[in-house]
Amino acid sequence: MSAPNTLTATEIARRIDSGKLTAEAVVRAHLERIDKRDSDVLAWTHLARDAALERARVLDRGPRQGLLHGVPMGVKDIIDSYDQPTGYGSPIYGTHQPLADAATVALAKHAGAILLGKTVTTEFANRHPGKTRNPHNPAHTPGGSSSGSAAAVADWQVVLATGTQTGGSVIRPAAFCGVYGYKPSFGHFPVAGMKANTEWLDTIGAYARSLEDLALFRAALMAIPHRPIEKVDLPRIAVCFTPHKDEMQPEGIAAIEEAATKLAKAGAKVTEFEMPREMFEMRDGQRLLSAFEGPRAAADEAHRFFDLLSKSFQEDKIAAGRKLDYAAWVEARKLGERGRAAVDATFTDIDAILTAPAPGEAPLGLERTGNATFNLLWTYLWMPCVTLPYGRGPQGLPVGIQLVGQQHEDARLLDIAGWVQGALR
């Protein structure tokens, strides 16, 4: 039998349900991996070792509680938990203890998940890095802002984890760390209990070890019936390099081109995505919208604790946002509305978009979390996105690909991702 910490969540749940594995054994295996590796990876801000083991023992006494019965999970430390501290990646909240679980935490627990601990986030899920290293090479960034969640799943320290995305904070770390990442359609996962950057972009997402795990996790976090991934007919895939192909690295371009060739050979109808003209303004619009709302979402911190904010947050969020006026914010909102309508109309001819989740492999250094350009468009358009691990770059680090689906057709996107994964294998 494989070590319990190397199994998928789907397999863990199946084996616990059949009596072949206990939740306590699963938790112990993950804790042993953390003890062995986390001094190098630094994925956690808080580890609830004793509480997780006690929760596992309670679950092992039965009855089965739900889809995630006995499955360990990590929660990005921008999301509240009543029984574990939540620091939001900031010294302002070094002793903060919320009074309630965030909605996604409560729903996962209700489905039987075991909250193993809180994972590292960048400061308020922005650009100032946390302590986490890329598990494949600690000299490289794991991406951000959901750095700890992506790294912990990639390093076999936890099987499921949540992240958040305002720009590219779920999809890019998944690509850099070589795991499956999922950003749902805007609003599909409840954001109650999350420290927000902007009400119009922030989306809670998920990390897992397989597409089947993402489907399972999605059902639990939405409190809907579990629908396993289904087989689909030959999909229509549109390749999109976005208007920013010149910012991509050779390995990122090669991954998309090679994947497109393989999918066409497997029978998919592969075309070039004809971008609506609104998309050419999307990167600037997303940044403007995020910047305008930054000093408003962080109004209390900016007024009472300004000196405890990082220099990048002071300048890139607070100062930059205060320079923007209401009219610019309204126009950015309207651009998003026009863009969503225009892109939605293209799905009469395609089933999914194949694009890059990042320029290439994770860059060297820990002072930055990488380029989010290749995520901003889809976040702004509220479209569901999935990162699939694909290959390796020149430094031996993971390179991923991204599939983007029609808004609200998340289950269909996961189905198509299953077909794509099979074709690429």
Image (tube, rainbow, N blue to C red):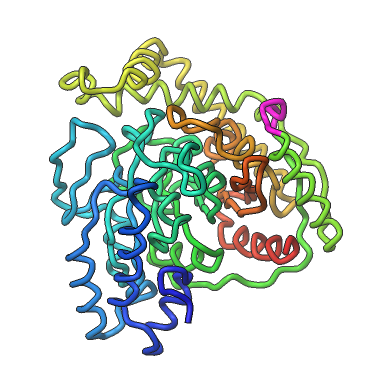
Looking at the image, residue 348 lies above or below residue 301: below
Looking at the image, residue 371 lies above or below residue 305: below
User: Residue at position x 74%, y 60% from top?
Assistant: 424
Please identify the quarter of the rendering in which residue 411 is found.
bottom right
Chief SS of the magenta region = loop
Please give left or right for residue 166 compared with residue 403 in the image. Answer: left
Residue range corresponding to the magenta coloring = 242-249
Please identify the quarter of the rendering in which residue 91 is found.
top left
Magenta stretch: residue 247 in it? yes
Magenta stretch: residue 83 in it? no
Q: Can residue 176 be seen from the camera position used here? A: yes
**In the rendered view of the protein, which quadrant contains the C terminus?**
bottom right
Residue nearer the viewer, 73 or 187:
73
Please give left or right for residue 233 compared with residue 72 in the image. Answer: right
Q: Position of residue 364 (x, y in %)?
A: 53, 32
Q: Position of residue 340 (x, y in %)?
A: 60, 38
Q: Can residue 169 be seen from the camera position used here? A: no
Q: Position of residue 281 (x, y in %)?
A: 62, 23
